[in-house]
Image (cartoon, rainbow, N blue to C red):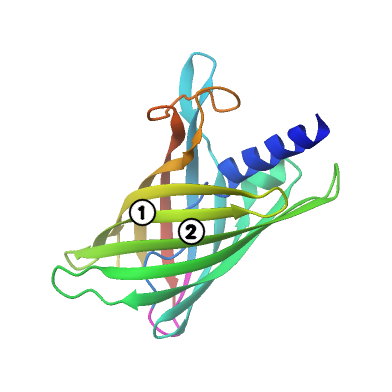
Amino acid sequence: MKKYTLHLVSVTLAFFSLHCGITQPVRVLPENETRVASSLGGPIIPLGNIAIVVPYLNGGVQYGYRENMTLFGNVHATALLFKDLGVDGGFAVRMVKENGIRPEVTLKGQIYFFWDFIRSNNKRLFPMATLNASYTVGEQSLIYFGGDNLFQLNMPDYLFSPFVGYKFGVSDMMQMQVETKWLAVNKNTRHGVFEGTTSIAGKGNIGAYVGWEMTLK
């Protein structure tokens, strides 16, 4: 029972925390450019007789380390409310540059670290790999689609989450972003913690997100 409970808590944390953010770059940044970013949103879950979007907040920094590589890191603000330190960091590389009907393809590698520093001193690592394709729309906007591949190491598990989003310029220095994900599409969520609120054919759950980025001079 204890092992099952720990597994359920771990999967729940992965589902809510590790998919509750869009602060990773969709495309690599220009070399030496720095941006601050934040996002709000998460899975749609039941609350009484209604369904709400989890108000999960995180924020971080992105840096154009090289022409085709961007480094980034984030702090999970909402996780702290549950006495859990959550941070993540990783890199994005441009695999293919957009050309005509060929989209730009970006590969991201990322590590999540969570530490329950009050209740159990439990520490957890979750690696994730993401591949997305994007097309420019006008001068400051783009549409993109892809999938997150999340791996749970302590109790081996794998979650796949396809997504689609739209990123657009608000000013010369600021961009906004909206995204929806089919979270954990490979998992049966008809019953239990997520109760299949926004499952499709009993699989996964739908998430909704909004984010912003600001370029620093």
User: Nearest the camera: 32 or 136?
Assistant: 136
Q: Is residue 176 above or below residue 32?
A: above
Could you say where residue 39 lies in the image, as x and y percent from the top left?
Answer: 48, 51
Is 106 on the left or on the right of 18, as rendered?
Answer: left
Mark 2–mark 1 Cα distance, whole angstroms, equals: 10 Å
Identify residue for label 1.
Answer: 177
Seen in the picture, residue 189 relative to 168 is either above or below; the reply is above
Mark on residue 27? none
| Residue for point 37% across, 76% down | 94
The answer to which image quadrant residue 56 occupies is top right
Query: Reading the chain from its start, which is encountered first: label 2 or label 1?
Result: 2
On whether residue 209 falls in the magenta region, the answer is no
Q: Residues within 10 Å of mark 1 (few under 14, many from 20)?
A: many
Q: Looking at the magenta stretch, what is its main secondary structure?
A: loop
Q: Residue at x 23, y 74 (%)?
A: 98
State the image coordinates of residue 38 (x, y, percent, origin top left).
Answer: 50, 56
Q: Position of residue 46 (x, y in %)?
A: 52, 22
* Residue at the image position 39 percent from the left and 49 percent from the top: 162
Residue bearing mark 2: 23
Residue 32: within the magenta? Answer: yes
Quick one: SS at disc 2?
loop
The quarter of the image holding the N terminus is top right
Q: Is residue 149 above or below residue 13?
A: below
Residue type at mark 2? Answer: Thr
**Secondary-structure class at tag 1:** strand
For label 2, the crowd category at 10 Å Cα-Cα, with few meaning under 14, some 14 to 19 and many 20 or more, is: many
Task: Please state the extent of the stretch shown in magenta in the rendering.
Answer: 30-35
Tell me the amino acid under the disc marked 1: Gln
- Location of residue 174 (image quadrant): bottom left
Residue 196 x/y as whole percent: 48, 25
Front residue (pair 14, 70):
14
